[in-house]
Image (spheres, helix red, strand yellow):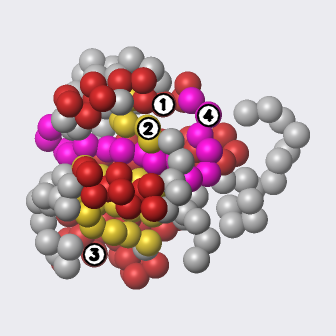
Amino acid sequence: TPAPFLHVVLHQPEIPHNTGSVGRTCVAVGAKLWLVRPLGFRVDDYYLRRAGLDYWELLDWEVVDDWAALLARLAASHAGPMWLLSKKATRLYTDVAYRRGDVLVFGCETQGLPDALLEEYAERTLRIPTTGAVRSLNLSNAAAVVMYEAVRQGAGRDSAFGIRDSGNAG
């Protein structure tokens, strides 16, 4: 099995529809999905699989019990640097150079990531800009935005994506 293009972590996700949609996007970009317990649903949930449609069987995914277990599994899989997404961050998600194997971490829908994690990884926190009209983007939308920024930057420029370098920068 080839190494994943990206690792996408959902820390304590609560809504099965969102997780299913993120899983579908992971299949589209060749990312591995990690779910960190506790989960707000069962992994055999009808809505989880419905949102992922028939792509769920193609998804490379794993459930881990906690943050420490996630770190151990990521280390064993030789994952790249970790980027945590939060509305509290000051650095934009477009201000970093993504590489194959990077880890993108998203918090739960209602609380985001715990402050302790944001403090521990302060230099690796990123945000997606929004107007003041909304608190944050939907989890599955946010994950798709960042995953496709990594693809756009070229981390995914290989035959699997059908992308050819046009000679233009960016």
* Sequence order check, earlier mark of 1 and 3: 3
Find the distance from the CA under tag 2 to the CA under tag 4: 11 Å
* Sequence order check, earlier mark of 2 and 3: 3
* Residue type, label 2: Trp
**Residue 6 can be seen, yes or no:** no
Residue 97: mark: 4
Image coordinates for residue 73, horizontal then vertical, percent: 38, 61
Rendered image quadrant of residue 82:
top left
Pointers 2 and 3 in contact (C-beta within 8 Å):
no
* Residue type, label 4: Ala
In the rendered image, residue 9 lying in the magenta stretch gets the answer no
Pointers 1 and 2 in contact (C-beta within 8 Å):
yes
Relative to 25, is 155 on the left or the right?
right
**Label 4 residue SS:** loop
Residue that mark 2 sits on: 83
Quarter of the image containing the N terminus?
bottom right
Residue at coordinates 15% horizontally, 37% vertically from top-left? 111
Find the distance from the CA under tag 1 to the CA under tag 2: 9 Å
**Label 1 residue SS:** helix
Q: Main secondary structure of the magenta part?
A: loop
* Residue type, label 3: Arg
- Please tell me whether mark 3 or mark 4 is closer to you in this view: 4
Find the distance from the CA under tag 3 to the CA under tag 4: 32 Å
Residue that mark 1 sits on: 93
- Please tell me whether mark 1 or mark 3 is closer to you in this view: 1
Image coordinates for residue 121, horizontal then vertical, percent: 35, 30
Image coordinates for residue 86, horizontal then vertical, percent: 31, 31
Q: Is residue 99 above or below residue 33?
A: above
Depth check: give the residue in front, 149 or 51: 149
Residue that mark 3 sits on: 49
